[in-house]
Image (cartoon, coloured by chain):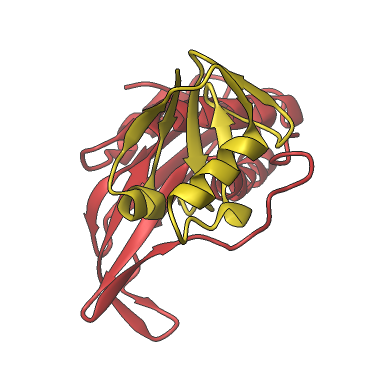
Chain colours: A red, B yellow
Amino acid sequence: MKQYEIVETPIDVQKYMDYVLHPSAGAVTVFTGNVREWTHGVKTLYLSYEAYVPMAEKKMAEIGAEMEAKWPGIRVAIAHRIGELQISDIAVVIAVSSPHRKAAYEANEYAIDRIKEVVPIWKKEIWEDGEEWIGAQKKYPAKGVERI
Amino acid sequence: MIKVNYFARLRELTGKGEETLDRDSMTVAELLDWAEESYPGFGADNVQVAVNEEYALKDDVIESGDVCAFIPPVSGG
C-alpha cells in the first residue's frame, strides 16, 4: 500500500490503521465515507467514482503535509476507492494517529473537508430512473483553488 | 502539441478521455474558450484546468508538451 492512494478494490481499513500506529501514538481516529442509499429522498442503486489518479494522489499527499504542519506529531494515511461501489461500501478511509486524541479527531475532519474541496475525484449517482455526476457548481476562482 | 484529459461529465460530453491539440502555446482562458466552442454545453465557467497535475490560473500559459486536464466540480469522499 501507499500512504496516499487511489484504489480499485475494496478498502481494508486495518491496513491504514496499522500504517499510522506507532509507539508514541496514544490515539488513532479512522474515518470511513460509505455509500449511502438515500440522499434527499432519492434512492441510489450504486455509485460510480472516477479520479485523475496521479493528481488525486498528489493532492492527498499535499493535504497530509498540510495536516502534519497544523498538528505536529500526527501520522496520516488516506485511500479513496474508484469504480462501481455498492450501498455501504467504503469509498474513502482516513487514518490519523497522534500522541493525544484531540489532534487525531481535528486533523481527521480537516482531511475529509479538504478532500471534498481539492482532490480530483468525481462521484456519479445511479438511480432507478436516471443518473447524475455530483459536484457543487462554482465559478472559476480568481486565484485558483484555495491552498493552505 | 498540448495534451488534454477529460473526466466525469466532460468525458461523457466529449465522448473521449483525452485528445491532443496542435498548438505550441495558449493560455488557460484560451483553452477553456476553445473547449466551450468545440463542445456545446461544456460549461467552462464551472470547469478548472490543471496543468501538469496542478491547478492553474486563467492567465497561466500552457506550452507544447504540457499535460492539461479539465476539472469539473469535484465530489470525492
Question: Vertical placement of A47 versus A40: above or below?
Answer: above
Check the picture and name the quadrant holding the N terminus of chain B: top left
Q: Residue at x 32, y 30 (%)?
A: A15
Q: Residue placed at 40% from the left, 51% from the top?
A: B10
In depth, the one of A69 and A82 nearer the eye is A82
B42 with respect to A88 (left or right): right
Q: Residue at 61% of width from left, 32% of height from top?
A: A63
Q: Position of residue A73 (x, y in %)?
A: 67, 23
Q: Is residue B19 above or below residue A47?
A: above
**In which quadrant of the rendered view does residue B32 lie?**
top right
Residue situated furthest right in the rendering: A142
Establish if B4 lies above or below A120: above
Image point (37%, 21%), residue name: A2
Q: Nearer the viewer, residue A82 or A108?
A: A82
Which of these two is toward me, A8 or A94? A8
Residue A132 at least partly seen: yes
Q: How many marks?
A: 0
Q: Is residue A95 left or right of residue A7?
A: right
- x then y, percent, for residue B27: 66, 29
Instruction: Place residue A12 in its image quadrant.
Output: top left
Residue A26 in sight here: no
Q: Vertical placement of A103 versus B15: above or below?
A: above
The residue sitting at the bottom extreme is A41
Residue B60 locus on image (x, y percent): 70, 27
Give the left or right position of residue B21, taking residue A101 as reference: left
**Which residue of the protein is positioned furthest toward the top in this rendering?**
B65
In the image, residue A47 lies at what x, y percent? Answer: 28, 60
